[in-house]
Every structure is written in C-alpha cells, then in structure tokens.
Image (cartoon, rainbow, N blue to C red):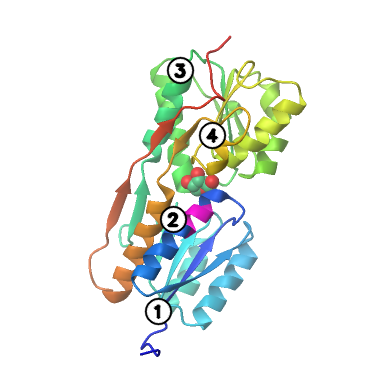
Amino acid sequence: NLIMKSAQTIGVLVPNLGNPFFSMFIKGVQSASRQHQFIPLIFGANHDEELEGYYLQELIKRAVDGLIIASASITGETIDNILKKNGIPYLLIDQNGGPSLDRIRIDDDRGGRLAAQHLLAFGHQRVAVVMPEHATQNLVIRLRGFREELAQHGVSLTADDVVLSPMTKLGGYQATAAVLQRHPTAVFAINDETALGLMRGLHEQGVRVPGDVSVLGYDDIDLDEYVVPRLSSVHQPVVTMGERATELLINRIHNRRQAAQTVDLPVDFRQRESTGPVK
Ligand code: RIB
C-alpha cells in the first residue's frame, strides 16, 4: 500500500549543518525514522532566528507530525505561538522546555568535570574558556561543571577568563587574540569546531599546541583525529542522541497522553595530542 493515512513526516531543525556534530545527529535521526517508517525533513537555520521561524511555519503548513528542534535561538515565544498553538508534538535538544516535555539529557555536568580533571591532572592552573554569548542550557551546565571542578581543586575561573565568541570555527579563530591576552596555559573550547578554529589562530601566532598552550574541545567529531595535533575532546554519543530523540518523538506522536519521558546519556573523555603537561 503506497498511500499512508498520515504523511509520517517529522521536521528537524538544527543550528548549523556544517558542524559534523549535527551530521551525526541527523544520521541517528534518519536511521530511527526509517525503522519506524517516518521521513525526516531537515533544515539548518544557520543560527538565524528569522530563518528558523520561517522553516517552522513552513513545516507546520506542510502538516509534519512532529518536530525535533536543536537550536540555540528558538524563543519561548516561538514555542508558544507556533508549536503549542498548533498542537504539534515536539522535542527540544539542548534546552529544557519544562517537566511536561520529553527530553534527551546528556550529562554535561560530568562532561565539564571530566574536562577540568584532565587539565588539572596536567598541572594547569591558568585556564581560559571560549563559548558563545547566548549559551543554551546544556552549555551553561557544561561550564558550571567545569568551573566547579576547578574550584574544588583550588583553581578559580572568573568571568574574565571566559572569552565570548560564536560557537563556530570562525568564532574560535577570531577568539585567538582575546585568549592570548589572558595568558592561559590551557583553553577549554566549548565545542570542537571552536577548538579547531582556535588551533588555527594559535598556529598563525606561532603558539605551539600543546607545548605552549593546551587546547581541549568537546563533542568528539571525526575531524579530531585528522588535525595536527589530534584534538583531545569529550565524547558525546550524538548518533544515539539522534536515534533516541526520534524514538521519543514518534512515541509521542502515537501516544500523546503518556507521561513525559527522559532519556539520560553519558559522556566520556578522549585524550589525544592537543593537551599536555604545563611547562
Ligand atoms: O557542536 C555543537 C554543540 O552544540 C555541541 O556541543 C552540542 O552539545 C550543542 O549544544
């Protein structure tokens, strides 16, 4: 039978299709969708709120059965005016939409702590962070875990040690001067793309990694293995995250009344070559 009762479509909105983290997420979305005979419509909004609103509206016009929204710029207003008003099941990634929503929760607190423990073990005491100004909830938790773990070992990370820059390769690159001004012995970049851009910037300034400065990323994207030096990072199970998010959403589409579900996923540390002992 080629004709289905419902279109069996889900809309997926990610902030940046150029980031391999989201390609892997989509890989998970696709495989779980396929298993359940759903088709995902995927959009990258390029961190652009207006474009995001546009895609959401268009997806709803096309009567998608549900939505997965992984976006830093989605506002509570959009959620209320577009999603809730239209009664469409949705799942937010990286944001806590309240207790009544299904959630995928990655242990960002532990991720931040693992990052701190690794740098502490190498003797680092002067540490900087690069992260975006408008951070999603998971990043706030990641930073908090990192900061608390440092503090527990007598190392303080002040607001001034946090360089605010967009969470992209270019953002990392452009943060180079501000990072160097702070004379850190190690930098924790809030995601790998930022770390890769920063490594390029440091290289151009003649700063050696990890000889002069250690650089630590987050996500464990495939590129980490291919850059010189290979990037140390915190692994996120992002394909599984895409699969579980899709399963939660499809369950919700089939059974709107069931209680909100939460899936917890772990992180772990991947030591490579970009971090080393303090000189
Ligand atoms: O690289 C994308 C980042 O945005 C990841 O660290 C992920 O957790 C999301 O918040």
Give the residue number, with chain letter if any, for mark 4. 217
Q: As rendered, which of 104 and 210 lies closer to the eye?
A: 210
Q: Determine if the C-beta at disc 1 is less than 8 A from ligand 1.
A: no
Q: Classify mark 4: helix, strand or loop.
A: loop
Query: Gap between marks 2 and 4, in whole Å?
Result: 20 Å
- Residue 160, quarter of picture: top right
Place of residue 252 in the rendered image (x, y in percent of width and height, measured from the top left):
31, 70
Residue 135 seen anywhere in this rendered image of the structure: no
Give whichever of discs 3 and 4 has the lower sequence position.
3
Q: Determine if the C-beta at disc 2 is less than 8 A from ligand 1.
A: yes
Q: For the stretch drawn in magenta, what is the main secondary structure?
A: helix
Give whichever of discs 1 and 3 has the lower sequence position.
1
Q: Residues within 10 Å of mark 4 (few under 14, many from 20)?
A: many
Read off the magenta span: 22-26
Give the residue number, with chain letter if any, for mark 2. 93
The three-letter code of the residue at mark 1 reads Gln
